Image (cartoon, rainbow, N blue to C red):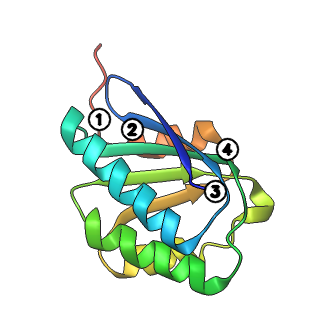
Amino acid sequence: MKIKIQYHAQPEYLQVKMRGKWNETYINMALDEIKAEADRQGFKRLLVDLLEMSRPNSEMARFLAGEHLAKIMPYPYKVTAFAKSEDINKFGETVAVNRGAWFRVFSDEQTAIEWIMEGVQQPP
């Protein structure tokens, strides 16, 4: 099953909702699609909702996704994701960050939004 992706442009970031089964091939294709859409819309900040994604089936799947994210969206892209706390182990995040990505994973949307908005000047 291919991963389904929805986009919603916010003033300062692109909101991305992913649904489906985590598959090593499809996750990289989804990341490529997300980057292309971010570039098309002119966003360097992305908020990714993973609540309706299945858990990665292996540590290798997490490793490969983190590696691919860093390859296609290094700094100045700032990417954050939020997922169910039981699905987070920070391994994919660590792989991505160690390879040059500006990336964090959180267990709640509000904290992810706060992180993605750090450094953005808000109107008075």
Query: Residue 92: which disc?
Result: none
Query: For numbered disc 3, what is the local secondary structure?
Result: loop
Above-or-below relation of 22 to 6: below
Badge nearest the viewer, 3 or 2: 3
Q: Earlier in the sequence, mark 4 or mark 2?
A: 4
Left or right, 112 with respect to 19, comes to: left
In the displayed orientation, state which residue is furthest to the right: 86
Query: For numbered disc 1, what is the local secondary structure?
Result: loop
Residue 42 visible in the picture: no
Total labels: the figure holds 4
Residue behind mark 1? 120
Residue 119: x and y in percent read 30, 42
CA distance separating discs 4 and 3: 26 Å
Structural crowding at the residue carrying mark 1, measured as other residues with C-alpha within 10 Å and reported as few (<14), some (14–19) or many (≥20): few
Residue 97 figure quarter: bottom left
Is disc 3 in contact with disc 1, using a CB cutoff of under 8 Å? no
Residue behind mark 2? 117
Q: Earlier in the sequence, mark 3 or mark 1?
A: 3
